[in-house]
């Protein structure tokens, strides 16, 4: 046992001691150099793409440098010593242009423990056509379990990717930043621990940021440990941020604006800003989604989405505003169950606030949200379609919500399984407004509803006045998340407040 431990320590020490920094300088480098110092840097990616890198190695691109083509190194790090693609020198981000000629501008295939950070990436072609292109792509193609991917603080923009379904491949799988399990996977291929953090992705398609695992349905098939945090996506062809086939993905503190910006005739043009699908236990929280487009042929256009095959997933503490298709899409199609939408603020979303599709997802819970609809809007509060896709009469709840409707829209409530309790309705009362037990139709006395700007910090106007009739007027809900929009503790016993703000005194 002692000998084994000493051997392991020696190997780790050897790896650390032999880790090497490699420098690349597009202006002053030379590919005949050793590449192991700033003064002897390589010039292009020829040597990098031919080399098998070791744990702890660093590939450092000089700031202000510009390269054409694809950076596609090989090798794997270990947990204690990942391989890093980063920067050196002074100035702006080093930039790599794929020029639409490469599959991915940065391409890491079948490798574990990599960090990619601090770069500017493009991959622009004259047309989307039938070619799938990426800015940054990590791909698992038959490699089993891969670990430890970190993509941090990169600017990815103008990535031209096909919008079409071709040869059994889903175009949602590719785009600005993609961590992807191949469509030929048999369920043994997956990623463990993926962090995508602090990146900006703009003018890219089909998806801005995506983690995708084609085979996920059985136990131990899903990709796990996914965190997508603090990113900005804007003007994306289709979806802003998407996870497919993940268990326990956490999507938080992201900003998505102007998603769904492109459409094609006879194409599948559905788009939402931030969503999960074919997944379990995924949490979408503290995000802002706004100005999502609903172009011709797009039935969606929402800020958020619980999509097909979502099990025990939660959308909470988010801010949705000015999305052309509405706040949230909830799809069943006989495959989803037990999803939650709570403590969110929807302000001036268009067309409808909530869309229920493919029947009703059994045991859906929609509670303690605030829906604000301003004057001049015809936004429906609840709508539904494609009822034959599932059981339209499945049980679901709608409780403790504040609906401020200064517009003219009403309600189209699916089926007979909905339970409506302790909601507060204010403003215009459409004839289709639900009649329910403990219904309140008084001014909720919010501080300044409808005044939210950019940023979750602009939402103080949705706090309750101490004399609000919504104070302690809700119904208690088990496993309610434990805190309100601002982190105040929720009561374990007794009535909570209606809406997103808990007022106890």
Image (cartoon, rainbow, N blue to C red):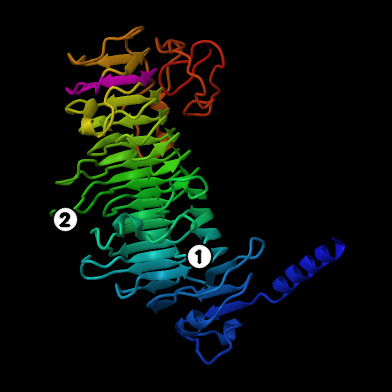
Residue pointed to by mark 2 = 264
In the figure, 502 relative to 89: above or below? Answer: above
In the figure, 388 relative to 154: above or below? Answer: above
Contact, mark 2 vs mark 1 (Cβ under 8 Å): no
Q: Position of residue 331 (x, y in %)?
A: 31, 35
Q: Is residue 405 magenta?
A: yes
Residue pointed to by mark 1 = 143
Q: 236 and 426: which one is in front?
A: 236
* Crowdedness near tag 2: few (<14), some (14–19) or many (≥20) residues, C-alpha within 10 Å: few
What is the residue that sits farthest to the bottom in this orientation? 32
The magenta stretch is 396-415
Q: Position of residue 268 (x, y in %)?
A: 21, 50
Q: Position of residue 99 (x, y in %)?
A: 31, 74
Find residue 128 and name its label.
Answer: none
Q: Quick check: 93 left or right of 448?
A: right
Label whose residue precedes the other's in the sequence (2 or 1): 1
* Crowdedness near tag 1: few (<14), some (14–19) or many (≥20) residues, C-alpha within 10 Å: some
Quarter of the image holding residue 35?
bottom right
Q: Is residue 81 magenta?
A: no
In the figure, 483 relative to 247: above or below? Answer: above
Q: 110 and 13: which one is in front?
A: 110
Q: Main secondary structure of the magenta part?
A: loop
Q: 164 and 88: which one is in front?
A: 164
**Residue depicted at x 36% and y 27%:** 362
């Amino acid at each position: 046992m002692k000998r084994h431990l000493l051997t392991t320590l020696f190997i780790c020490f050897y790896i650390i001691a032999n880790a090497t920094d490699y420098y690349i300088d597009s202006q002053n480098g030379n590919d005949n150099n050793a590449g192991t110092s700033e003064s002897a840097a390589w010039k292009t990616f020829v040597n990098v793409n031919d080399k098998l890198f070791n744990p702890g190695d660093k590939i450092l691109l000089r700031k202000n440098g510009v390269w054409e083509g694809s950076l596609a190194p090989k090798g794997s790090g270990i947990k204690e010593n990942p391989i890093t693609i980063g920067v050196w020198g002074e100035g702006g981000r080093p930039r790599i242009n794929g020029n639409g000629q490469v599959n991915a501008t940065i391409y890491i295939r079948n490798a574990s423990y990599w960090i990619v950070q601090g770069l500017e990436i493009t991959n622009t072609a004259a047309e989307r056509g039938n070619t799938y292109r990426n800015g940054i792509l990590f791909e698992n193609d038959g490699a089993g379990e891969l670990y430890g991917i970190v993509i941090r603080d990169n600017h990815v923009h103008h990535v031209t990717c096909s919008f079409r379904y071709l040869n059994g491949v889903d175009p949602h799988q590719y785009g600005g930043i993609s961590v992807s399990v191949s469509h030929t996977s048999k369920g043994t291929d997956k990623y463990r621990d993926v962090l995508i953090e602090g990146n900006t992705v703009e003018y890219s398609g089909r998806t801005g940021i995506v983690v995708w695992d084609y085979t996920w349905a059985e136990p131990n098939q899903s990709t796990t440990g996914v965190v997508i945090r603090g990113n900005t996506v804007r003007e994306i062809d289709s979806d802003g941020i998407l996870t497919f086939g993940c268990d326990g993905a956490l999507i938080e503190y992201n900003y998505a604006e102007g998603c769904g910006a492109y459409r094609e005739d006879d194409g599948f043009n559905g788009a939402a800003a931030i969503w999960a699908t074919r997944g379990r236990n995924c949490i979408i929280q503290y995000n802002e989604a706004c100005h999502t487009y609903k172009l011709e042929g797009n039935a969606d256009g929402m800020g958020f989405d619980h999509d097909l095959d979502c099990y025990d997933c939660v959308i909470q503490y988010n801010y949705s505003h000015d999305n052309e298709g509405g706040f949230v899409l909830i799809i069943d199609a006989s495959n989803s169950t037990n999803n939650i939408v709570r403590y969110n603020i929807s302000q001036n979303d268009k067309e409808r606030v909530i869309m229920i599709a493919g029947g009703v997802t059994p045991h859906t819970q929609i509670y303690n949200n605030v829906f604000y609809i301003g004057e001049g809007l015809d936004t429906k509060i609840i709508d539904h379609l494609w009822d034959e896709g599932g059981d339209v009469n499945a049980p679901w709840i709608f409780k403790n919500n504040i609906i401020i409707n200064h517009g003219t829209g009403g309600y189209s409530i699916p089926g007979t399984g909905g339970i409506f309790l302790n909601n507060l309705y204010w403003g215009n009362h459409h004839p289709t407004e639900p009649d329910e037990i403990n219904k309140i139709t008084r001014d909720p006395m919010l501080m300044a509803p409808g005044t939210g700007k950019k940023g979750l910090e602009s939402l103080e106007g949705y706090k309750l006045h101490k004399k609000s009739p919504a104070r302690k007027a809700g119904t208690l809900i088990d496993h309610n998340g434990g805190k309100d929009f601002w982190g105040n503790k929720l009561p374990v016993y007794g009535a909570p407040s209606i809406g997103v703000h808990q007022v106890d005194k």
